[in-house]
Amino acid sequence: MSMVLIEKLLEPLSRHYADTDVVEVRSKAAKTLVIEAGVGADRIRQISEPDFTIHRMKTICRALANMRGLKFSETEKPQLSTTLPGGHRFECLIGNSVTTGLSLSIRCKHPKQIELTDMGLSDQMIAYIVEAVRTQRNIAISGSTNTGKTTLLNKLLTFLPDDRRVVSAEDTPELEVDRFFNGVSLLASRDASEGAGQRTWQQLYDHKMRISPDNILFGEISTMNAYAALNVLNTGARGWMCTVHAESPELVPNRFQENINAAGHILPDVAGFMSRLVDLVIHIKRDNYGNRFVSDIYEMKKQRYVLQDRLPVAERAA
């Protein structure tokens, strides 16, 4: 199916997610969408969309799967995770695993840069982070869902020179690495049984370590890639960066441990392992009005906070 036809199919959704103020488009039923836009108490609203039908949603999933070389089947593989034209993250589950028959979320990606000052950081904290990136410290960005972890990671990449050998590995392409002419973006299959020509995370690990990376980036840490991400750290790599769901910086190793255990791998002391190899955790939160901010900066090797609850540790002590 041509891109023109796919864009035509997407119109009941794209007319909403094309708005640069829209953060996310969701649905749990035909002909109804939930739009999250901007910040404030009224940022979430429900709207009617008559052209959005279950039949159309299934057709969209089949078309996107075919275009990306993925698998989608209403009965055998009813979940699809991919990106839409424009880079918007697409996540859909159809069928009996959802009480309403449909669960859809489109996380929007709009071409606008954030500034670190927008995240509530002082000039001193910004200088600290920029220096950490430029000196290839190993950095994890943590937070709950939809806090802007990937957006922040993309911002940190702007502090690297264009000739840096940046190698990214993701299962959904979201990291902005095209400007690194000496770099490369790798895509892993979300499922070992799917993906036309796509490699598994372990196969990509073997490839990454043979192509002389200066910086190694991982997209969102999951059961699929947590073990591979820590394997990379154990090679002496520098400039390692990732995003991970976690309640606090100190719980980041626990999240890795849970993912590794769930995948059936064995690494008994993830916390001890990471405390020797990860330099920094930058933690993001979002308040009830949709505002995103860096709340904590934690030096994992030294087990100390530089920023805690939005205040420099020196100011908190005073």
Image (cartoon, grey):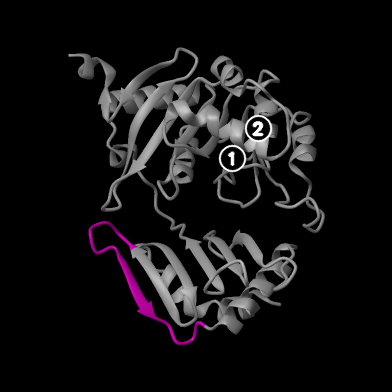
Residue located 74% across and 41% down the image: 201
| Category of crowding for the residue at label 2, using alpha-carbon neighbours closer than 10 angstroms: few (below 14), some (14–19), many (at least 20) | many
Q: Secondary structure at mark 1?
A: loop
Relative to residue 74, is residue 257 drawn left or right? left
Residue located 17% across and 14% down the image: 318
| Nearer to me, 232 or 264 | 264
User: Could you say where residue 122 lies in the image, as x and y percent from the top left?
Assistant: 26, 29
Magenta segment boundaries in residue numbering:
37-52
Relative to residue 303, is residue 96 drawn left or right? right
Amino acid type, label 1: Ile
Report the residue marked by disc 2: 229
User: Could you say where residue 63 lies in the image, as x and y percent from the top left?
Assistant: 68, 74
Amino acid type, label 2: Ala
Residue located 75% across and 68% down the image: 76
Task: Please indicate, yes or no, whether residue 162 appears anywhere in the rendered image.
Answer: yes
Task: Please tell me the numbered disc located at residue 221.
Answer: 1
Task: Please tell me the numbered disc located at residue 240.
Answer: none
What is the spatial separation of the Cα atoms under label 1 and label 2, in whole angstroms? 8 Å
Residue located 47% across and 23% down the image: 280
Q: Secondary structure at mark 2?
A: helix
